[in-house]
Image: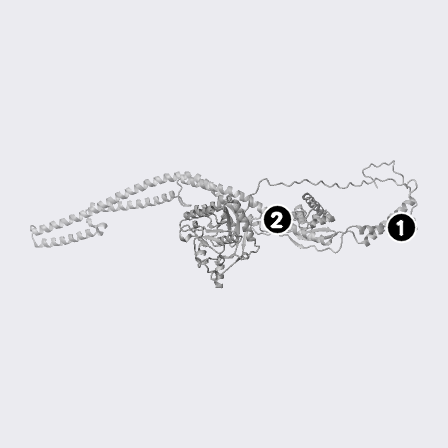
Amino acid sequence: MLAYDQPINPAKSGAPRSFAGFSVLDLVDLLWRRKVAIAMAGLICACAAVAIGKSLAPKYSATSQLYVDPRELQLVDHELTPRAQDISGLAMVVESQARLITSNSVLLRVIQDTNLDKDPEFGGDSRSIMASLLGLFGIEVHSAGDVKLGQMGALEALNRHINVKKTDRTFNVDIEVWSRDPAKAAMLANAVANAYLAESRTSQATAAKRATTDLSGRLEELKERLRSAENTLATYKAQNNFVGTQDTAISDQQLSASNQRLAAARALTLDAQAKYDQIEASRRASSDAGAIPEALQSPTIANLRAQYAEARKRYAELTSELGPLHPALRQMEKQVEDLRRTVNEEVDRFAQSAKNDLARARDYEASLNRALEAQKRQSVQLSQASVRLRELERDVEASRDVYQSFLKRSRETEEQETLNTSSARIIGEATVPQRRIFPPAMSLVAMLGFTLGALAASAWFIAALRLSPDTSEAQPGPVAEKPAPPSKPPTPDQPRQQATAALPEKPLIARLQEADVMRTLRAIRTTGEIPDLTGSGWPTLRAGFPPMTFLNAMRELRAIAARRAPAGAMPVMTVIGASPGEDRSIAALNIALAAARDGAKVLLIDADHDRHSLSTMVNGRGTSHGKSETSRLGWLGIGGKASRTIKTANGISILPVVKGSDARASDAIGKAIAQARSVGGYDLVILDGPVLPCGAAGRKLLDIADGLVAILPFNLDINDCMEDIIAALGGAERKLVGVVLAELQPAAVNRQRDKQYA
């Protein structure tokens, strides 16, 4: 063997013996004479190869096939990442996805799903007998650092066990995984494929969520910019009197209307001028004055002309009968002249009227002309100011377009968080392999061992025979240095980080389910002197003492409220909700029943001034046969007879709603609570209400309470209801100690079922 890292030294190289005269026959004769030794050497090597092959750990390979289509599903108009259209781009996408299969994120997911870090084949330590015994008692001997190091070792080993191949000119990717166990090899191949698909979906959702967060962060700034631009535009319009519709300003409308009125005034002026000229022309022509159109249309002129015609006729008759100096003839002549003068006077009045109309029309035209000139000057000024107006409008339009595009894109990316647009799928699941890939079959191993042993023995005999003694001495070859074992990397010191700030106490979440309550008919109820709330028709807690989760949650709520109450004082809990239905009152009644079941004296106050469902149930339905009476604490008789406390058979005293204004009712409830705390006799006070959002009177009740319990009905969106409650509470949010999910059937369904039962 040549040492390639050393220079060739011809001086030290021995001169080989000449092989002159050495023929193939001599070689065959030599090997035939040593056939037994050669055969023995071959058998020994074959046996050694079989023994070595049997000692080697077998390897089984399983293959899972994926179809990675870079043309993803088109679920929305705009995707987060543009798709490649050319062949080279598609091939690069598939190559990238094939490399993603062997990424740390995918393989770590496989390790966590299959617990490979505990498998000895992938770096996991085999547990000793002592460790197994400790594990039976739940004692783990491995620290968090060891677990992390085990995952890294399993990741490195799994990388060596995986081979990903992409078939040329296709979108198919083969995931080949080998292991010593055939079932494990198939399981790991399928686990890698499933982890890749899950990681693809997770990465898409993460990218969409990140894009949504970035876009949402910009929305507030864009909204503020749009609002500022619109306010600037509105202020500029108000300062420059840009008032009108979206298409036409009021100044332009007024200018157009003034032009129309001026044209009409000019037409009236021309009409009056023509009328006046016609009357004057008739008068100057000394013709019949009553021949003008106005005179012909006048009934007075017509009557005078008729009298005038009759007088002329009479005058003509008298002229033929009497002499020119007869008194009757002279009197008739005077009458004719008087009638003619009267007609002329009427015509003169028409002329004067036409003259007055002409003057008025001219004055009206002049005033309109002056107003039009003023409006023209104003329009010129507005035209100069409209340059800045159009600039502001363009700014507003641009800001609006950007904001709308960001808002639409934010909604699209938010919807894409739940969509899976990847078209990658498993087209062939890995099956348990039936044959191992290493070592090969023992027959082949034996054949190879026999062949190599025979060739080695033959070469030895040939070398021993043909080499001379001076050159047959074996030259020491370069000694192969044994590779140093790989040093184990030191365990990284990863101290746990502790939280620096204490988290606020979160409200307790409880569930009031159908399994926790029982339903009764109102017609079948207790008719004694003391009413029983379990016969009111509302769903109430089941009788007995079952280990219900709701009872335990109510105990924790009362404990929290007691801690928040003043030292030695009775706790006050207020049941609130954003729904106007009976769900809040039903939940408040069951909370009181849970406390009474634990032996507590409970005062339940109806603080819902709008619906007062609890008072209606107690006075009208649930205790119609019971009697409202004053409790042993006379100070609870507030607001007259209708508001006195009602004792029930369940250990609960109910104070109905106080009639009157909200402020008066809130003050009365506050006084009742203060007296209950001072006198004693009760362990807990529960307020049913108010409904959020509330006014100043409801705020007083929230301030009195030591703890708030929010009721969220299941038939509504609990997230929206909780957001409404938090927004309505404001600063009182810190008093929220619990949330009850009322998972009961709606009241309308129960009433319908009661009717069916009845």
Q: Residues within 10 Å of mark 1 (few under 14, many from 20)?
A: many
**Foreground: 170 or 285?**
170
The residue that disc 2 covers is 202
In this view, the residue in front, 18 or 581, is 581
Q: Earlier in the sequence, mark 2 or mark 1?
A: 1
Q: Nearer the viewer, mark 2 or mark 1?
A: 2
| Image location (x, y in percent) of residue 489 | 72, 41
Percent of width and height locating residue 514: 54, 57
Dividing the picture into quadrants, the one containing residue 149 is: top right
Q: Residue at x 89, y 51 (%)?
A: 40
Q: Residue at x 60, y 41 (%)?
A: 499
Query: x and y percent of residue 660 in the render?
Result: 40, 50
Amino acid at dot 1: Ile
Residue in view at x 80 percent, y 41 percent: 482
What secondary structure is found at the residue carrying circle 1? Answer: helix
Which amino acid is tagged 2?
Thr
